[in-house]
Amino acid sequence: MSKYFDNWKFILFLCLTLGLAPYYPEPHIWGKIKWIRGGAVGMGLIDWFDFVLHGFPWVLLLRWLIRQLP
C-alpha cells in the first residue's frame, strides 16, 4: 500500500477527484474549510468525517512534497 502513497501520479489523481469533488458550485473541500473557518456552527459528525475524507488526498500531497525536499 505504501507504494501508492509515494506515487505522485496516484496522489495527484486523488487530489483532483476525491479531493475536489463535487466541483460545482465550488470544490467540496473548499466549502468545508470555509464552514470551519466560520466557526463550524451546525457541523455534525458526518460533516467532520466528510472533511477528513476529502482532505486526506491533500495531506498525502503535502507529505509527498515534504519528503521530496533535499
Image (cartoon, grey):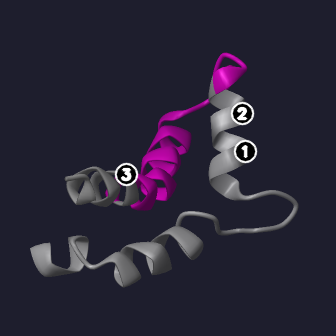
Residue 39 placement, left or right of 26: left
**Residue 40 within the segment the image draws in magenta:** yes
Q: Secondary structure at mark 2?
A: helix
Q: Which mark is residue 54?
A: none
| Disc nearest the viewer among 3 and 1 | 3
Q: Which residue is mark 2?
A: 34
Tell me the amino acid under the disc marked 1.
Gly
Q: Residue at x 39, y 83 (%)?
A: 9
The magenta stretch spans which residues? Answer: 37-60
Q: Report crowding for label 3: few under 14, some 14 to 19, many 20 or more residues within 10 A (C-alpha).
A: few
Majority SS type along the magenta span: helix
Asked if residue 52 can be seen in this view, the reply is yes
Tell me the amino acid under the disc marked 3.
Leu
Q: Quadrant of residue 21?
A: bottom right
Residue 69 placement, left or right of 25: left
Residue 35 placement, left or right of 61: right
Q: Which mark is residue 62?
A: 3
Instruction: State the residue lying farthest toward the right.
Output: 25
Asked if residue 1 can be seen in this view, the reply is no
Q: Report crowding for label 2: few under 14, some 14 to 19, many 20 or more residues within 10 A (C-alpha).
A: few
Label pair 1/2, CB-CB below 8 angstroms: yes
Among numbered discs 3 and 1, the one appearing first in the sequence: 1
Q: Which residue is mark 1?
A: 31
Q: Quadrant of the N terminus?
A: bottom left
Q: Quadrant of residue 61?
A: bottom left
Q: Residue at x 76, y 68 (%)?
A: 23
